[in-house]
Image: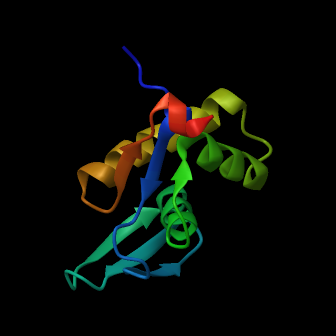
Amino acid sequence: MEENTSNVYWFIEKSSRFVLKEFEEESLLYDKLSGSTHLVDNVSAFILSVLDSSSKSTGQLCEELASMAPDLAPNQVNFMVKSHLVSLESQGFLSKTELSDSFSS
């Protein structure tokens, strides 16, 4: 069963944890907690920079990316955001929490 993505909120556990240096097609990500560096694509960099200031739902992240890339179809934006969120979570860069329906109304 697919989760209700409007109730899933994504966040970075330690604010200002990352330093991003953006280039044309990718970004260099420095993790201040681990001291490691990573090469990430622009969508990952965008998601991390948005979540550095506050948590957002999957839907909110899709809306923000869609406003930055109006040439992409909504299903492309949804796929890109969701696949990047899963990847960033699996690497330990993000965490998520799911709000129950009674809290999200």
Residue located 67% across and 51% down the image: 65
The mark total stands at 0
Q: Nearer the viewer, residue 25 or 93?
A: 93
The image quarter containing residue 91 is bottom left
Residue at 64% across, 27% down: 75
Drawn side of residue 17 relative to residue 27, left or right: left
Query: Which residue is outermost to the front?
Result: 102
Identify whether 96 is placed above or below 48. Answer: above
> Quarter holding the C terminus?
top right
x and y percentages locating residue 56 in the rendered image: 55, 54
Rendered position, 70 above or below 46: above
Rendered location of residue 38, percent (x, y): 31, 72
Which residue appears at 55% of the width and 76% of the height? Answer: 23
Tell me what residue is drawn at x 53 percent, y 39 percent.
Answer: 103
Along the line of sight, the residue nearer the viewer: 7 or 26? 7
Identify the colour scheme used.
rainbow
Q: Which residue, as the protein is rendered here, is positioned at the far left?
A: 34
Q: Is 13 rendered above or below residue 90?
A: below
**Residue 9 x %, y %:** 47, 48
Picture quarter with the N terminus: top left
Q: Is residue 56 above or below residue 100?
A: below
Out of 77 and 98, give the one closest to the viewer.
98
